[in-house]
Amino acid sequence: MLMPVIPLYRTDAVPHPQAQVCVACEVRQAALFGALDDAGLARIHEHIPSTEWAPDAVLWRRGERGSAAYTLRSGIVRFERITSSGERRIVRLAGRGDLIGQQALLGEAYADEAVACTPVRMCRLPAPMIQRMGAEEPALLQELMRRWQRAVDEAEGWLAELTTGPARRRLLRLLDRLAADAEPGALLWMPRRDEIGDMLNMTVETASRVVSQLRREGVLTLQGPRNATVEAAALRAALEAEDAG
């Protein structure tokens, strides 16, 4: 007599509602969970909160300890610190699809203050969940290491490309980076002149002068106090001219 076969796992199990949300997420391929296939996402058994932040809101302060990393679903976040001389320095920007707050995964304090530049939407990824899933999905750990290295490379590139050299070249490179981070069809976030100075290590007067110059040349068009459009061909030509000179 044949005994009935009893499956060890339910074969008709419906994925956790959060896994279904992650499968349909508009930034999935650009985000950390883009390293997982649908079966990997089905291992998500916890709710992942989505949080929203207004412009200039402080997400966390330097030295605080968090319990989660975050995936940016939309918006731009800046990372800043105060130097020993009391000056503010903006050391990096993060945009759509980026992973931020990785220090929390190691139980370390945040190295910089994180501030929303625009309206921001983020998914909160608790450290225990990432650690559990990393143990089950090696692809997730590999992607996490890639993103950590990318953050290091971006910080080094920021220092090399955006804080040294002619002021015009620095601002052109910043606009190029902001254009790359902008969502399709959306206006560019335009930093205030003091923020440009803190990002690019220049005075507010120099930032104002170069912005005015680029507006006259048709590279940049302001759309209100905090938004702009960039003429891609003119920006590329201006960058090529700077690099050639």
Image (cartoon, rainbow, N blue to C red):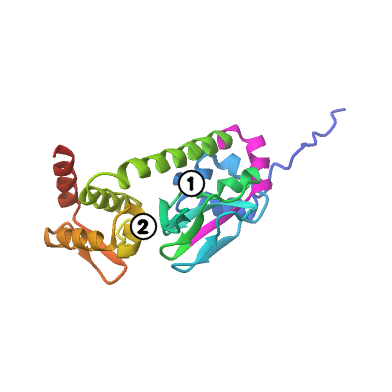
**Residue 112 drawn at (x, y percent):** 51, 53
* On-image quarter of the N terminus: top right
Vertical comparison of 76 with 129: above or below: below
Outermost residue to the front:
85
Task: List the residue tagged with mark 1.
Answer: 31
**Residue 5 drawn at (x, y percent):** 79, 33
Which residue sits at x=74%, y=39%?
9
Which residue sits at x=46%, y=42%?
151
Question: Which region shows up in magenta?
Answer: 121-140
Outermost residue to the bottom:
224
Apparent side of residue 31 relative to residue 229 in the rendered image (left or right): right
For the residue pair 244 and 55, the one nearer the viewer reads as 244
- Compute the Cα span from label 1 to label 2: 28 Å
For residue 198, the mark is 2
For the residue pair 219 and 232, the one nearer the viewer reads as 219
Which of label 1 and label 2 is nearer to you? 2
For the residue pair 85 and 123, the one nearer the viewer reads as 85
**Residue 174 drawn at (x, y percent):** 29, 51
Which residue sits at x=36%, y=57%?
198
Which residue sits at x=51%, y=57%?
113
- In the rendered image, residue 28 lying in the magenta stretch gets the answer no
Magenta region's main secondary structure?
Answer: helix
